[in-house]
Image (cartoon, coloured by chain):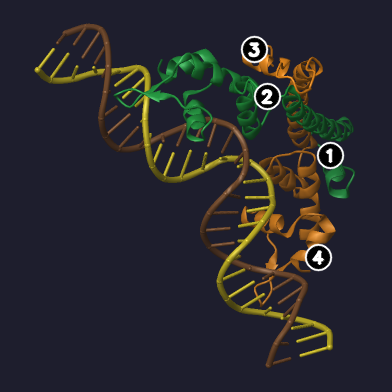
Chain colours: A orange, B green, C yellow, D brown
Amino acid sequence: MNISDVAEQTGLPAKTIRYYEEIGLVHPDRGANGYRVFADTHLHQLAFLGRARALGFSIEDCRTLLSLYQDKTRASGDVKEIAQEHLNEIDAKIAQLRQMRDTLNDLIRSCAGDTRPDCPILTGLAEGQANS
Amino acid sequence: MNISDVAEQTGLPAKTIRYYEEIGLVHPDRGANGYRVFADTHLHQLAFLGRARALGFSIEDCRTLLSLYQDKTRASGDVKEIAQEHLNEIDAKIAQLRQMRDTLNDLIRSCAGDTRPDCPILTGLAEGQANS
DNA sequence: TATAGGGCTTCCAGTGACTGGAAGGTCAAG
DNA sequence: CTTGACCTTCCAGTCACTGGAAGCCCTATA
């Protein structure tokens, strides 16, 4: 299997797959021509990585998760801990974005948005109504 | 006013203030010794930038907002348009994070998190229950 | 006056996770 | 034998800083 087949099947760009090899996440074989040759295991690993990344796990988390995935003697508690920590980060990020959203929304709603220069958004930014 | 005073008053790190000068967001004067000298206008500009950044505006948006702020003939509609577009991006990001959060939360709740190797989080990542 | 410390300067490199592009080798079809 | 798609590596850029080194400047104290 060549890289473009893997790209198609995993939904990952070929560039990303090469990058994942470069940082040691996957280790495809090489053909006599120098091309990367992917076996089904590599395909599965890359699909796994793609899904973990889609859930927002960092590359380093993905590396750990993948090694736990391949370690049949793992403790599920180790996996859950990583996931829970990541969930907390997501929750924190959502809370922060909501805060930003609310402040910004207030400013927007108070702005006429016409051709006149008076703008509560700018005064808000200038005078500190925007402490998020 | 030296840079550390401005840093303290705006809450921005001195490094960031230097960076903002480097990319042309602010133009402090220079003393005979080569030190940056900040007037009140610079202080206000930096505070403005800090608040805009805290609301998640990109540096380029900040640049535009600052120039609109200083243009007394601006149309508030121009400001509002930038803000609205940014609000939409924030909303999209929140929606995406919520999706990730929900999927991840389902996986976490179905995982025992003990010393046994069985782990629905890993099987979910492996088998595609995690298409966010 | 010498020195110690803190603050200031510039410049370079690194972050995370890719992404774009150039230069060039390889393969299959016609 | 050529064409065009595919593959390779390597380098640079993204975004918004952040850390650190090397070295000048300023003030206070001995």
> In the displayed structure, does residue C24 sit left or right of residue A6?
left
Provide the residue designation for mark 1. B121
Where disc 1 sits, the SS reads helix
- Amino acid under disc 4: Asp
Q: Position of residue B109 (x, y in %)?
A: 88, 30
Provide the residue designation for mark 3. A128
Disc 2 and disc 1: Cα gap in Å? 53 Å
Q: Residues within 10 Å of mark 1 (few under 14, many from 20)?
A: many
Q: Quadrant of residue A84?
A: top right
Disc 4 and disc 2: Cα gap in Å? 53 Å
Of the residues under marks 3 and 4, which one precedes in the sequence? 4
The lab-note entry on whether marks 4 and 2 share a chain reads: no
Provide the residue designation for mark 2. B74
Disc 4 and disc 1: Cα gap in Å? 27 Å
Depth check, mark 2 against mark 1: the one in front is: 2
Disc 2 and disc 3: Cα gap in Å? 20 Å
Where disc 4 sits, the SS reads helix
Disc number at residue A5?
4
Q: Chain letter for mark 1, please.
A: B
- Amino acid under disc 1: Ile
Q: Is residue B13 visible?
A: yes
Q: Chain letter for mark 4, please.
A: A
Residue depicted at x 79% and y 43% = A54
